[in-house]
Image (cartoon, rainbow, N blue to C red):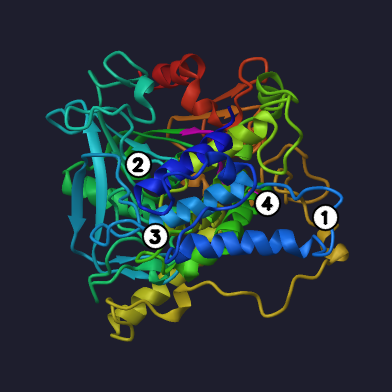
Amino acid sequence: MGPMQGVARSAPRCLRAVGLFRQNESICSFAGRNRFPTSAGRRTLSSISARNSQSATAQTPSSKDSSNPALSFPCLDAQEAKSALLSARSLESGPEPSYTTGHHEQYRCQDPLLLDWGGVLPEFDVAYETWGQLNADKSNAILLHTGLSASSHAHSTEANPKPGWWEKFIGPDKPIDTNKYFVICTNVIGGCYGSTGPSSFDPSDGKRYATRFPILTIDDMVRAQFRLLDSLGIRKLYASVGSSMGGMQSLAAGVLFPERIEKIVSISGCARSHPYSIAMRHTQRQVLMMDPKWARGFYYDSIPPHSGMKLAREIATVTYRSGPEWEMRFGRKRADPSKQPALCADFLIETYLDHAGEKFCLEYDPNSLLYVSKAMDLFDLGRAHQQETTTRRAEYEAKIAQGGKDLNQSDIACSLTLPEKPYEEQPSVTASTPSMNQSVTGAAADSDAPPQDLVAGLAPLKNHPVLVMGVASDILFPAWQQREIAQTLRAGGNQTVQHVELGEDVSMFGHDTFLLDLKNIGGALQKFLQ
């Protein structure tokens, strides 16, 4: 039975529990004929039934039967049923789920944090967890950076025995050996697992930030993490380690605080976001924001945009794995070949994506997805971008020093806006613009030479041992981006760069390889840290 069939069949039982279905109604009437049984006074599902009836009637002349019966849509029924269930939640808890992965430590910083695009957090929290013991001179700390939607719970703890997202990679004698190292993992600011983000309460008025939360960057996340390190008395990290978005953070930490890090590890990351990954994250955000329940981000006292989140996660899941793996795993198999094709989830790959979206849609705050994914898009360690940011921050700091900007209120400048003119194709410009994996030093330059702007941007890492790992089957962070990091560092004079690339003969798991391949990813990491 496919995941959507399970949802469709279980929904009536759930709805009966909240008094929305009559006890004697048949499940078949729900899934088979696309009608919701209702009783007087139950307006929510009555309106759903009316819409479904109107849809069928609009296609069928009243004077005679249609040539073919109207299709049923259990996948849409399930989404409407979920909305009804969320609407019926207790007023005490509210319809918005509580985003948590269990017990974690909490660091509260009372000092304001100026963000790269002019926003200010008057105070902020950083959720974190630790493993191992910090040695006497505090020189054995490893800061572990997370991917987009991960929490600080990378590994189980006594207070929270739930397996973490990197459970097999952390522990005694594991790649990150807790017999040797003191491991710290945080939930990034902008997230929803204990660190300050859009779902947090603004101390200025006691209301949730929602989309009043300011635009933030990967660098902003790293600065908040180093405030935590300051509070722990850790002046220098033994290593900064991260995968995916964490790989971005790890490099950014080295550029921002080169004197405070000894070793750097970036797995399936990049030094700047490229158009394909930006496009895929943009699509996810658009799908989410087009859900009417998103309500421009102010949904916390209403039904969350679970349908938009589900679809956004399905799009993301497509980028996390590889085509060859899915060919072997699913092929062209349908969930139930004995039944006629359906417009809802029908092929096995469709049921897999449907399940992934359904599982995630209430586990992560939609606004956090918007803000954190946008931070990934804005990421660029090129020298020109860094200089622009430095200049912009200096201007904001000057305004604050002169009293021209209230620390407790971000001005409108930190809200990104649409361009004044719509996009127009400009062949004369794009034809002469090098792609991101080409040199910008001129037509006569070596085609394999890294961009000089990036060489200058990564110059602070010249003397750091750096491990860069990539996966050939990764379509979200393609392997050329990790090669670019290694080549750029070497071009800048770094003689201690180690670059590992796993071919498709080694891993077909795409971007998710860093979560799954203990032997190759974990083995290289362990060897580098020793």
| Foreground: disc 1 or disc 4 | 1
How packed is label 2: few (under 14 Cα within 10 Å), some, or many (20 or more)?
A: many
Magenta region, residue range: 266-275
Q: Residue furthest left?
A: 136
Label 3 belongs to which residue? 87
Label number found at residue 275 = 4
Sequence-first disc among 2 and 4: 2
- Residue 87 to residue 203: above or below: above
Sequence-first disc among 1 and 2: 1
Asked if residue 271 is among those painted magenta in the image, a careful observer would answer: yes
Location of the N terminus by quadrant is top right
What is the CA distance from the residue labelled 3 to the residue labelled 4?
39 Å
What is the CA distance from the residue labelled 1 to the residue labelled 4?
51 Å
Sequence-first disc among 1 and 4: 1
Amino acid marked by disc 4: Pro
Amino acid marked by disc 2: Ser
What is the CA distance from the residue labelled 3 to the residue labelled 2?
27 Å
Majority SS type along the magenta span: loop
